[in-house]
Amino acid sequence: MKPEAPLQDLPQGLRDEQSQLLASGITTWGELEALDELQISRLAASGRASARNLRRLKGMAELGCALDLAPQDAALLMHAGLATVAAIAGSSPQELVTRTGRLERQLRSGRPPVVDLALARRWILVARERQNTN
């Protein structure tokens, strides 16, 4: 995702957080990525949004904006235990496929795996490039 991409199509379980963010004037992934812990706490205290879910969304924004991932791909990687650019850059393609595939089997999504070796290699290369530029 690009930092200027609008916050939309979030999972149903995050609708309170999305409403709170939009009501607070945070309308893009880049603005969400820029939130600090104090702002997250204030957002959580001022409405129905939970601080936990807001932190999860911020993590998705950080990963998605850094690697230009779709929100659902960033969420998949985070929930598979690969929540940072460094974690992805330090992984092997097979490890990435194994971890995301295991998560999808645990969730019993019934769909074919989203991540294959080619996609995993691409994500790892982008993560390594990103790590070298920072």
Image (cartoon, rainbow, N blue to C red):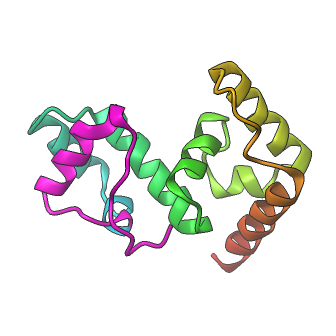
Decide: is 109 above or below 64.
above
- Residue 62 image offset from top left, x and y in percent: 49, 59
- Residue 128 image offset from top left, x and y in percent: 77, 68
Callout count: 0
Q: Which residue is at 25% across, 47% downward?
A: 18
- Residue at the extreme bottom: 133
Where, by quadrant of the figure, is residue 97 drawn?
Answer: top right
- Residue 28 image offset from top left, x and y in percent: 32, 66
Q: Which residue is at 72% across, 45% downward?
A: 114
Give 134 or 53, whichever is nearer the viewer: 53
Where, by quadrant of the figure, is residue 64 drawn?
Answer: bottom right
| Residues drawn in magenta | 1-29
Horizontal arrangement in the rendering, residue 90 relative to residue 85 (left or right): right
Q: Which residue is at 33% across, 56% downward?
A: 8
Decide: is 9 above or below 52.
below
Q: Is residue 80 magenta?
A: no
Decide: is 39 above or below 11.
below
Give 62 or 74, whichever is nearer the viewer: 74
Q: Is residue 16 magenta?
A: yes
Horizontal arrangement in the rendering, residue 117 relative to residue 84 (left or right): right
Where, by quadrant of the figure, is residue 76 drawn?
Answer: top right
Q: Which residue is at 39% across, 70% downward?
A: 5
- Residue 91 image offset from top left, x and y in percent: 83, 49
Which of the image's four quarters has the C terminus?
bottom right
